[in-house]
Amino acid sequence: MYRTQTCNELTLKQKDKSVEVAGWVHSRRDHGGVIFVDLRDKYGVTQVVFDPSHNKQVHAIAEHLGREFVIHVKGKVRPRPKEMVNPKLNTGQIEVIADRIDVLNKSVTPPFEINDSQEVNEELRLQYRYLDLRSNIMQNRLKLRHAVSFAIRTFLTKQGFTEVETPVLVKSTPEGARDYVVPSRVHPGKFFALPQSPQLYKQILMASGVDKYFQLAKCLRDEDLRADRQPEHTQLDMEMSFVHQDDVLSVVESLYAHIFKETMNVKLKTPFTRLSYDESMQRFGTDKPDLRFGMELIDVTEVAKKADFKVFKDAQQVKCLNPDHDFSRSDVDSLIAWAQENGAKGLAWMRVTKDGLESSIVKFFSDDVQKELLKTTKAKPGSMLFFVADKSAVVAEVLGRLRNHLADKLDMRDPKKFEFCWVLDFPLFEWNADEDRWDAAHHLFSRPKEDHLDFLEKDPGKVKADLYDLVLNGTELGSGSIRINTPELQERVLKVIGMQHEEAQEKFGFLMKAFTYGAPPHGGIGIGFDRTVALMAGLTDIREVIAFPRNKKAENPMDGSPSDVDDKQMKELHIKTSILKKS
Ligand code: ASP
């Protein structure tokens, strides 16, 4: 080793000892001839002193050190002078007086300083990711990510799971997003796809008798990128045989309790809250409710109908929020504008005072109706009510978002709290109005509930499945389901989305064939691994916990991908390009 200690280890215990340290020059200060270097490695910082009266040659070399030079120093540990003691550093009591220095590598001037302020623009950080990753903050994120994957592997191994790698070059099968494709050299004109998830392979592993499978799997989706999306992300993928929904949920709950305990010493409450999809939509207006705060949607449709207010009377549904807070006139105006930008025709409001309700619409509400409204909403003086009257889907959408918006405004989302919940019983299909057909709400392999099988052809919108989402603090972490395990049922489901026998066989024949040889009942889940780590670290952007992420244009500014390939490669692949449109 180039060192006897890391840059975080030396204390007064090593006083007068000869030591070796190595790392990067974090900073160099020249104090009237004596040079002080903060030497940094992954573990910490040690002060090294180059004194010409101690060693002239060594000092002369130190005069040429720049930021991020890599050096190796031999020297003696000595106490720092009193006024230079730094109680914030583990090594703050000592310094190393250099007897020898080797410059192991030079550095050109870095485009930004290595520190934890992260004020540099993201493109530059991604371009020089190796410098960005040198900061403590990024090193700690990588460490947390590793600790989480280690905890997952330890826990699931103990539970009898086997980690199995599934192929990266797969058959292109629609799974919701757009595939990345890879041309085959051996089969001119044919393509592989990169997997959107290991879904079909993990189901086939169940048909293969693996019983309990998991994998930290790369999933690749050629989607337009939103802030929280990456074309390649890592998923904790799991599948189990002979299980019911509850078995999957409870393994995941114990797994997350283990992860949080091991890596952050946080004790999670299990079992997690369970809500049906319908209940979640009614109470929170969303299928990813943030349960760190209350402020549920209150249904006042019946009371509102008794008022003389046409907007409320004619609406399919009227619901309101009671944030238990009073807002100024200008706040209310901006909330109305916000609601309109977010799909509402308007946002009605009432202020609750000691003398009753106040607002321009109160005149349409008789005393009795006002009383009933106060009773239903449990609103107290000093608060305000915000109403949306519309079709129920719009009411849920707008008030669901407004609930989160108000929670942000009123600082109701405690970053230290981790509120998990399961949302259950999702519909299997959703209507695609643009293309006039049913789509799978999650994917095509979820098993309809036994007593909903009859609706499959008659009324697909009514079919619910044992389909579940894991939600943390208002963010969807993952989805899973109990799967179909017979070819007959799989074909029926494919038919609902308009896939006839030939196409179904062409695309999913290999899965259905596996089902014909005795596939056990099975179910599982795919959980965002990057997202889990990000939320644990208090972050919203998964790029912050991925070593080499892509920017919003799916480029990697460090390696310059995607890039051209040379003519020879294209020839080998039997491909001639004529680009129709260059972005
Ligand atoms: N393959 C699914 C997904 O990526 C997860 C699952 O159903 O297990 O969303």
Image (cartoon, grey):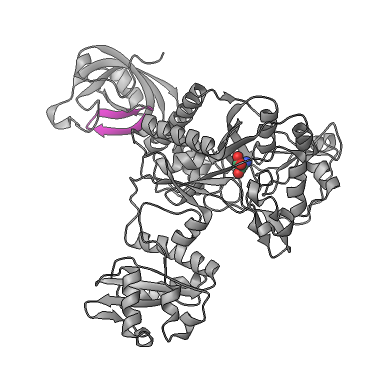
Farthest residue, direction left: 82
Answer with left or right where residue 491 lies relative to residue 283.
right
Q: Nearer the viewer, residue 436 or 305?
A: 305
Identify the magenta region. Answer: 25-42
Whether residue 554 is visible here, answered yes or no, is: yes
Where is residue 508? Give x, y as percent.
Answer: 77, 40
Where is residue 571? Give x, y as percent.
Answer: 84, 37
Residue shown at 34% from the left, 48% from the top: 415
Where is residue 36? Give x, y as percent.
Answer: 27, 29
Check the picture and name the quadrant holding the N terminus. top left
Check the picture and name the quadrant holding the C terminus. bottom right
Residue shown at 26% from the left, 33% from the top: 30
Where is residue 286? Give x, y as percent.
Answer: 49, 58
Answer with left or right where residue 222 lies relative to residue 140.
right
Magenta span: predominant SS is strand
- Image quadrant of residue 319? bottom left
Q: Quadrant of ligand 1?
A: top right
> Is 33 within the magenta?
yes
Q: Nearer the viewer, residue 414 or 46?
A: 414
Farthest residue, direction top: 17
Up/down of 167 relative to 551, above or below: above
> Is 317 within the magenta?
no
Whether residue 330 is visible here, answered yes or no, is: no
Q: Nearer the viewer, residue 556 or 379?
A: 379
Answer with left or right where residue 158 lies relative to residue 95.
right
Answer with left or right where residue 428 lies relative to residue 272.
right
